[in-house]
Image (cartoon, rainbow, N blue to C red):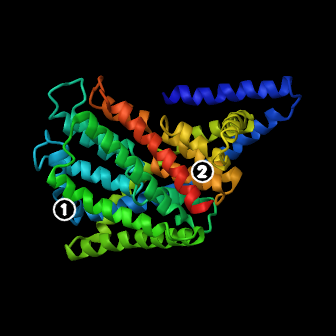
Amino acid sequence: MLNGLWLGFFVVAAISALAQWLVGGNAGIFAAMVESIFAMAKLSVEVMVLLFGTLTLWLGFLKIAEKAGIVEWLAKVLGPLFARLMPEVPPGHSALGLITMNFAANGLGLDNAATPIGLKAMRALQELNPSSTTASNAQILFLVLNASSLTLLPVTIFMYRAQQGATDPTLVFLPILLATSVSTLVGLLSVAVMQRLRLWDPVVLAYFIPGALLLGGFMAFLGTLSAAALASLSSILGNLTLFGVIMLFVVIGALRRVKVYEAFVEGAKEGFDVAKSLLPYLVAMLVAVGVLRASGALELALDGIRHGVEWLGMDSRFVEGLPTALVKPFSGSAARAMLIETMQTQGVDSFPALVAATIQGSTETTFYVLAVYFGAVGIQRVRHAVGCALLAELSGVIAAICVCYWFFA
């Protein structure tokens, strides 16, 4: 999948460049493409320096949370809910703890770190699966919730914005939180319909009703604020939540007699191992996206979408942020490259860049997740997983665009 996508970027770029040279007489197009190759290779290294620090930092804190029993406590708290949503998983099974850890990593926006944990969870669920080739209901629900992007604290998005010089990297905190809530809710409801899950069960309602009331009241409060006040609140809550989570992990770890420094270093080493494997993928995708942009092919495609949007009488400012959405279902590294490229060309705090950042934080690499998670356990028949995951993905994109107009337009 990634091979075809990457190759396609170069083939489309080559065709576009030849057309501009032979038809448009633009002989300098090839020089621009070569310059873009080296510029993007340099940018990849600059981004990786900060990515090393970010993953190392947060996996260190996540290890403290794990040793302090926070993850185990979350698994117990969510146990009754999982028992209703995944009735085939026995209470106390190792899969529940792994699922909780995976959700915690996803919630912190550590998608690269969440994948290894998610694969362990999928293998644990496969042990309970009566079929070796057909996805179980529990596996489908777990995958769709992953594909819906359970991002509560998108630290990697903050990192990319900081690296590109954003005056306030956490500005997109609330938009991402609202958009990812929509995508996750749609993903859960779609699976519930297909699997006939009893969401009106008193235990399930006891979890969902307080959350729904809290979210509804919060959104009603947000509706009373101006755009400037919304942006300011997003910044304050983003920074406060970020630091609050750090202090929560450290203080609870200390109270539980965890050697917090040693635990942090242990987790940080894992973060370093995860981060160092990402550079080749980041270079590959950034170079391909840079060539595609320099060839004029990407702008041509966006012009077509823009004309269609304007023909419908809609504002088209969001179109420049759509490249991230178009490739996100296929490749996280390609979407990451599109996001960084949009920040570079449009400005890190421009409306398209804010839309792209919100989309990146509230959607997931659906086809990649399907291929990796189900491929790791030999699942061939995925049943309704694809349809539910893509519906959640689409909902996240639409919600991200709408929320950005609410906050930033």
Residue 45: give its label: 2
Q: Residue furthest front?
A: 313
Q: Is residue 356 left or right of residue 302?
A: left
For the residues labelled 1 and 2, say whether their Cβ atoms are less than 8 Å apart: no
Residue lying at 64% horizontally and 38% vertically, measured from the top left: 289
Residue closest to the far right: 25
Residue 280 visible in the picture = no
Q: Rounded to the nearest whole Å, what is the CA distance between mark 1 and mark 2?
A: 39 Å
The answer to whether residue 323 of the structure is visible from this angle is yes
Quadrant in the picture for residue 191:
top left
> Of 358 and 343, which appears nearest the observer?
358
Q: Which amino acid type is marked by label 1?
A: Trp
Q: Secondary structure at mark 2?
A: helix
Q: Which mark is residue 7?
A: none
Looking at the image, which residue is at 41% across and 37% down? 391
* Residue drawn at point x = 26 percent, y = 42 percent: 120
In primary-sequence order, the first of circles 1 and 2 is 2
Within 10 Å of disc 1 (Cα), the crowding (few <14, some 14-19, many 20+) is some
Write down the quadrant of residue 271 in the picture.
bottom left
Query: Is 189 displayed left or right of 57 in the figure?
Result: left
Crowd band around label 2 with a 10 angstrom C-alpha radius: few (<14), some (14–19), many (20+): some
Circle nearer the viewer, 1 or 2: 1
Q: Position of residue 303 (x, y in %)?
A: 72, 37
Q: Is residue 64 above or below residue 301?
A: below
Q: Which residue is mark 1?
A: 73
In the image, 217 versus 96, the foreground residue is 217
* Front residue (pair 30, 194): 194
Q: Position of residue 347 (x, y in %)?
A: 68, 56
Residue 143 locus on image (x, y percent): 32, 39
